[in-house]
Amino acid sequence: MPDTTIEKSSASATEALQAQRDLQLFYLFSTTLLSTMQLNKLLHLILSALVCEDNGLFCRAMLFLYNQKTDMLQGMLGICRSNTDGFRVVFSDPDNPLSGYWDLDADAIARQMQSDLCLKVRETRIDLSEGCQMVAHVVENKRLYRINDVECLNCRDCDFISRFGISSFVAVPLVTRNNLIGVIIVDNPVKHQPITDQQLKVLQLFANQAGMAIENTRLYRNLEETHNELQDTRQRLVHGAHLAAIGEMAASISHELKTPLITIGGFAARLGRMLPENTPQRHYLDTIISESHRLERLLGDILAFSRKPTICFQECNLRGVVKECLDDYVVLLGERKITLETSVPSGSWTVLGDSNQLKQVCINLLVNAQEAMPQGGRLQVGLRAGGDGGRPCAVVSITDSGGGIPEELQSKIFTPFFTTKRHGTGLGLAIVNRIVQNHGGSLKVFNTDDGAEFQVILPLAPFDDPQTA
């Protein structure tokens, strides 16, 4: 047989072996991409497959993800051949060589993340407008580039080449549906072996599959998050329906109980007037009367909270509402040794709302303030102009000297049925908060030097300016 025939036969056999080896690599890579939906693990598997010694491709691989908003590449992962311990083939059927996929355990992934190369890559950002122009070409044209240019190696515009000690490299984009995900950069910094055309073909095929796999993993993760959110929403809706049913039942029971309680309290008061003072029977009746009144207030709060709120929006003078409430409580405050200080300037202070409900807001806050000062103190009530989200607003402030509210309780005080009072219902501030929100306003609470300040912020009616009224 002539030598040329032998050489051709040998070359054909070598090409066949190479083609078989490449097909096996492609198969393993494809099955590996389908083996996990964890994005972090998927990225480690992709780069490990490119630098694993058994695959004979490259010595080092780096992944940079593209941020379209900043037009920058952010370093995410870097793996060199010495960091592929733990990268192995797993066969689901030992007798079938085409049943395997590559895998990495958690410890191997952690070691790769802690490697010097990976840390350096994660610290690297490539500004495509000012950084490496060759990488910018890859991003702009979305095609593979092999860089052996001496001018690029001596480029002074960026430190990417010198930072990683690169002599020649290949940059391949990760693209899905014509959208750039990132760039993989591979090279052989130790052995300085040239990158062959066959390796470029393998790299391009790997990159095509990797881009789709990364996008699918992202979509799966988004789908999973959306599914979890829908599950949470469904549970909240079911819980809300249960609470609504309980609320309706509580309102019905409260309505039924209120009438006999009024009757009990009324007859007890009549009997009390027939009995002399300082007798055990009179003490018993006084207890019945006070407890029946407390239960009436509790049932009234429950009915007020459970009743569907209706607001008759009309122009009302907030200053007049505040002054009316203060006039009603000024005598009681004096009896409780509470000094009242007011700062309620003149003006219309017109808001759109229900004056009766706004009066309930002020009364509840005044009652809370006086109960916070059982030994007396100072109560400050103010009205001023303010802003909330760019809207002109009126701010009613009620400040006491009762020691303030513990910080850990401030987020709970507007929660229904939460109370720190011995005989409180826990609905007063919840009702106030709901009324204010229904009027398009907000209720805030702050601690002062010696007490607490509640601020009721309500939007002023259009074209109303209290400063010039």
Image (cartoon, rainbow, N blue to C red):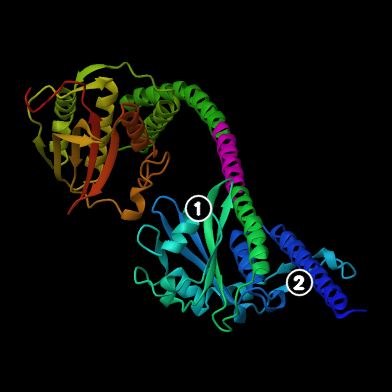
The residue sitting at the right extreme is 1
Q: Which amino acid does label 1 sit on?
A: Asn
Q: Is residue 223 magenta?
A: yes
Name the magenta segment's main secondary structure: helix
Residue 89 circle label = 2
Residue at horizontal 23 percent and vertical 39 percent from the top: 455
Q: Where is residue 10 in the image (x, y as percent from the top left)?
A: 84, 76
Residue at 41%, 71% (x, y): give it: 151
Q: Residue at (54%, 34%) from the top-left corner?
A: 240
Query: Dot 1: what SS?
Result: helix
Q: Using residue 211 as the reference point, say whether residue 366 is left or right of it.
A: left
Q: Which mark is residue 248?
A: none
- Of residues 354 and 263, which is closer to you in this image? 354
**In which quarter of the view is residue 396 placed?**
top left
Q: Give the range drawn in magenta.
A: 221-241
Picture quadrant of residue 177? top right
* Apparent side of residue 451 relative to residue 37 in the rendered image (left or right): left
